[in-house]
Image: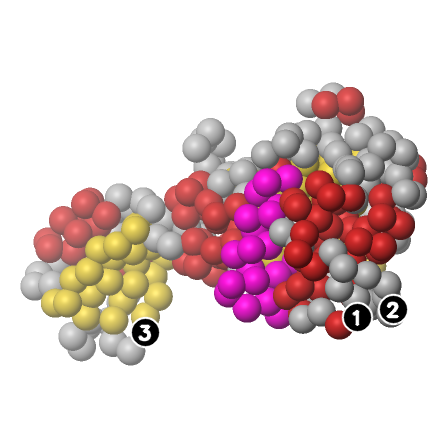
Amino acid sequence: MTATETAVAFTGAVKTFGAVRAVDGIDTEIAPGETVALLGRNGAGKSTTISLLLGLIEPDAGTVRLFGAPPRRSVTAGRVGAMLQEARAVPRVTVRELVTFVAGRYPAPLPVAEALELAGITELAGRRVDRLSGGQTQRVRFAVALAGNPALIVLDEPTAALDVEARHAFWASMRGYARRGHTVLFSTHHLEEADAFADRILVVDRGRIVADGTGEQLRRSAGGSLVALDLAGRTPEGLELLPGVRSVEVRGGRARLRTDDSDATVIALAGLGAIRGLEVAPASLDDAFLALTSGKSHRSDEPGRSGRSDEPSASRQTPSPLPEAV
C-alpha cells in the first residue's frame, strides 16, 4: 500500500509518560474507505493512539501519517474530523448555529442540513446545545465531526455513557457516513460494537496491537471451539496435550479447553474414559479478547505467528508475551 493509498499509517510509534509506555511501537495501516475498530480495555492505550493520530501529541519515536502527510497538516487541510471523549457544550447557541459555524471553517463542508440528517438530529436543529440530553449531545458532537465532510473521521469511545436506544441511533448514523466511502476509525471497549460495525478490529493491549483481523478471524485466533467437561475428581494434567487443544482453564470443577479441532479433542477425551457434562461450543469474541489480552502463553500458532491467511495478523508485532505498561 503506497502513501497515497493509505489513510492512516503508524510506523514504530512510541509514546511514554514518565515510566508508563502508553504506546509501545505500533505498526499498522488503514486503507481509504475502511471502518476500523480500536478495541481494548480501559488503559490499553487507545486514547493515546488517537491523540497521536490527530497530532494532539507527538510520538517519542516512529512516525504517524494521515494520507501521506503529518497529522497536523491533514487536520489543517480539513481531511480529518474527530469526536473525542472530552467536550463541553457551548452555551446559548442552537444546534444549527454550532454546526454551521464548524462547517464554515472547512474548505468543502457538507451542507448543514445534510450533516444534521446524517447524525439523526434534524429535529434538534433549533434547540440549544446546552439543554440537550447526554445522548442528544453525543449525536450533536457527531454532526460537528461530520460538518467538514472529512475523508477520515475519528471517534474516541463514541457511545460511552449512552443508553441502548441512543447507541443504536448513533451507529445507524455512523454507518450512513461510512457507506459514502469515508474512512472511519473508532475506539471502543464494547466487543459487540467492534464486531458489528467494523471491517477490521485492531486489539490493543498495553500499548501494542496484539491482533488485527475481522471478528471471525479473532474468534479463530482464540481457538475455533470451546470443549467443556466435568473433571469429576480428576486432575487436568495432560489435557493441554490432547489434539487441537491450545489452552486449558479450570473453573469450579470444570475444565474449559480451547481447541482448533473439537472433533479430535472429544475423540481423544473419550479415549481417556467416561466424559461427564460434555459441552462443545464455538469460541466467542469475548473468549478471543480475553485470550489475546490476558498475557497468558499459548502455542506457537497464535495470531501473527502462524502465517496463515485466515488468521489475524499482529501488525508485525509479536502478540505475546506482552510488555509491562498502561
Q: Are marks 3 and 1 in contact (CB under 8 Å)?
A: no
Q: Residues within 10 Å of mark 3 (few under 14, many from 20)?
A: few
Horizontally, residue 98 falls left or right of residue 320, namely right
Question: Residue drawn 87% across and 68% down?
Answer: 92
Mark number, residue 92: 2
- Against 276, residue 292 (above or below) is above
Residue that label 1 marks: 130
Instruction: Give the foreground label among 2 and 3.
Output: 2
- Callout 3: SS: strand
Compute the Cα span from label 3 to label 1.
49 Å
Measured Cα–Cα span from mark 2 to mark 3? 56 Å
Q: Which residue is mark 3?
A: 251
Residue 197 % position (x, y): 53, 46
Q: Amino acid at mark 2?
A: Arg
Where, quadrant-wise, is the C terminus in this rendering?
Answer: bottom right
The nearer-to-camera label among 3 and 1 is 1
Assign a secondary structure to mark 1. Answer: helix
Which comes sooner in the sequence, label 1 or label 2? 2
3D distance between C-alphas at marks 1 and 2: 7 Å
- The residue drawn where x is 85% and y is 32% is 108
Q: Nearer the viewer, residue 170 or 278?
A: 170
Locate residue 224 relative to residue 189 in the image: left or right. left
Amino acid type, callout 1: Asp
Q: Of the numbered discs in the image, which one, if any, rests on residue 317?
A: none
What is the crowding at mark 1: few (fewer than 14 residues within 10 Å), some, or many (at least 20)? Answer: some
Q: Residue at x 55, y 68 (%)?
A: 163
Residue type, label 3: Arg
Q: Magenta residues? A: 157-177
